[in-house]
Amino acid sequence: MVGTELAKPKFISKIQKISPAEIGTATHLVMQLLDLETAPTTESVQQLISNLVEEKVLQPEVAEKIDQASILAFFATEFGQLLLNEYMIVKREQPFSLLIKAKDIFADYSGDAMDRLLVHGIIDGFVETEEALILYDFKTDYVPEAADEAFFEKIKAKYRGQLNLYQSALEQIKGKKVTSVKLILLRENQILEMLE
């Protein structure tokens, strides 16, 4: 009989678009869970992602959007090689709490100068040696092919406040100065130094 099939409701037929934030979160998870004892390969990254899908930690649609080539390209960089060579002292996904003056967060804060806020966050990672304390943070922002120095300065400005908080927290936790803050743009395979 013709026309007996029911139409699909809109909510079923409509494909939900995956947000850049979901892809970024999934990418961070992969970067956090990758075994650094051996250099990641296409196979090891794919296997990790497959396992996360099987364990229902990642949705298959989101897993497909993870830029595996960018992850592998990062580990071919000098800093990526440092993380692999020093894997025993690499700390990843480190939570922190930081008590900070409200006026240092809000430019137009009109309350008491001694008011403080408790800030919680998670540092993507850091490496501590006797000589250095290197903080790093991954981003999956879109970077156009024609990106110039001005574009990268805007990216640095966008994340400066966040990374300054991370730096303050890490310095308080470790009781020493951070020597380098690296903003890693995975999609562009660019590593920007944030300390000036």
Image (spheres, rainbow, N blue to C red):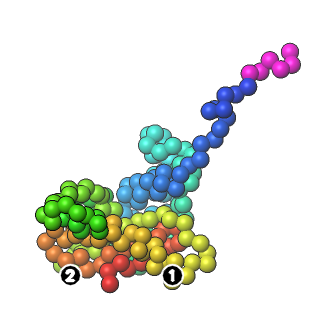
Q: Give the prevailing secondary structure in the magenta stretch.
A: loop
User: How many numbered marks are there?
Assistant: 2
Q: Amino acid at mark 2?
A: Glu
| Between 47 and 143, the one nearer to me in the picture | 143
Which mark is on residue 150?
1
Which mark is on residue 78?
none
Label 2 Cα neighbours within 10 Å, binned few <14 / some 14-19 / many ≥20: few
- The residue mark sitting in front, 1 or 2, is 1
* Image quadrant assignment for residue 162: bottom left
| Between 159 and 18, the one nearer to me in the picture | 159
Quadrant including the C terminus: bottom left
Where in the figure is residue 46, as x and y percent of width and height? 52, 54
Up-down relation of residue 160 to residue 31 (above or below):
below
Q: Amino acid at mark 1?
A: Ala
Label 2 near label 1: C-beta < 8 Å? no
Q: Residue furthest right?
A: 2
Where in the figure is residue 123, as x and y percent of width and height? 30, 62
Report the residue marked by disc 2: 131
Quadrant including the N terminus: top right
> What is the span of residues highlighted in magenta in the rendered image?
1-6
Q: Which residue is at a point 51% across and 83% down the rendered structure image?
A: 149
Where in the figure is residue 147, as x and y percent of width and height? 57, 78
* Image quadrant assignment for residue 136: bottom left
